[in-house]
Amino acid sequence: MKKHSLSLLALIVLTMSLSGCALNNEAKASSSYESKASTYFYDEKEIAEKNSQPKYPTMDVAPAKIVTDAKKYAGTYSLDWGHIETAGLRKNLLKVNNDGTFVELRVLTDNATNSDKRYYVDKKNKLHSKKPSTYALLSGYVTELKGDVFLSYANATQFYNALNEKGEDKISPLPFEYNYQTFKYTGYQGTKFVDNTFEVNLEVKDGIQKFVKVVPKATPRELTVTPLEISEFLKDSKEKLTSKNYEFNNINDFLQILNRKIPQNHDIQLLDINSYQNFETTDEGNRKAIYAFSSTSSEENDVTTYLYDGERIFVSQENNNKLFEEFEF
């Protein structure tokens, strides 16, 4: 299985346009339950409204100080670099606030292979595929030391948005693979304010990387929340999923929690649920599935079948799918 890794403070970034396509695959009986609205997808406005804690972690920047004339730097900036697309960066935005705090968004995709895709199932039980994105959200303070103004990163979160039934990227605990971390002040002036831009202090052969101020019609929704807010909001949901307390309201919920566990060279197929109404498990019991799909290797024709019985997730890697064991994350 392909592993994705990202150093949250690294400025080597990737881009690829999201594209979606419908697959000719529909199994009218892939679920024995009527589809209901998911409880696992959130938007940034909802997260911001429910936040009652500090939006930014406390950070000791001594001997530097947080800028006192922050309004001078406030605004939205976009990375200006002629090679962002070939490097793999779809979006890199910076929002500096009037109080000297900032949020930076990096939307990355892995363009090493054209086969990289994720799946979702719409309300009509139709399977689709779409290019995935990796989101890195960082925040911190605009600081000053000996006349130099620079960004001091305090924390970051890296996460993969799940796809809802409309194929929209939404913040969700379902992908499981998101992390949160904080940083100590080091004094490193990695992104420095020079000539009305925030210039990235990174040695690259393809020109200077710098954040240039732009005037968007509206603040991009991704910049209306902070890493700390996302982490706190999703923490409880992630803990429930880790303890196997699932609340899947449709087959897409079930697919999203496993999406990133499926190898990139595998194709997804929705299965007829009627074939799994009395499947056998390794604990010598028989159970009734309510959601079912399979992944098949395009190279070796190996089939893995995933079932959900309303309480637990089961998997079988046998092509005959006779015996299922409980899935472990």
Image (cartoon, grey):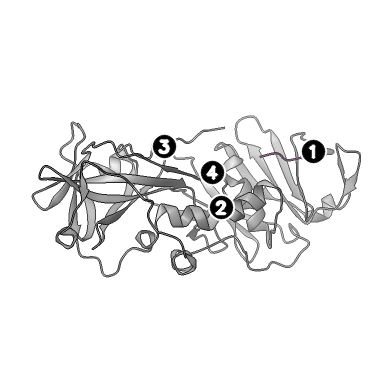
* Residue name at image x 63 percent, y 57 percent: 252
Q: Which residues are magenta?
A: 324-329
Could you tell which of marks 4 and 2 lies nearer the N-terminus? 4
Q: Is 328 part of what is drawn in magenta? A: yes
**Residue 253 visible in the current orientation:** yes
Gap in angstroms between the C-alphas marked 4 and 1: 23 Å
Q: Is residue 11 found left or right of 43 in the rendered image?
A: left
Asked if labels 4 and 3 touch by Cβ distance under 8 angstroms, the answer is no
The residue beneath circle 1 is 325
Q: Which residue is mark 3?
A: 6
Between disc 2 and disc 1, the foreground one is: 2
Q: Which amino acid is tagged 3?
A: Leu
Q: Residue at x 37, y 55 (%)?
A: 56
Give percent across and percent down for residue 179.
49, 43
Residue 248 position, x and y percent, is 69, 58
Tell me the kind of residue under disc 4: Glu
Q: In which quadrant of the rendered view does residue 73 lie?
A: bottom left
Name the spot of residue 11 as percent of width and height, x first.
29, 38
Q: Residue at x 36, y 50 (%)?
A: 58
> Does the magenta-highlighted stretch encompass residue 227?
no
Mark closer to the chain start, 4 or 1: 4
Q: Quadrant of the C terminus?
A: top right
Amino acid type, callout 2 = Lys
Q: Give the Cα distance between marks 2 and 3.
A: 21 Å
Residue neighbourhood size for the residue with mark 3, other residues' Cα within 10 Å, grouped as few (<14), some (14–19), many (≥20): few
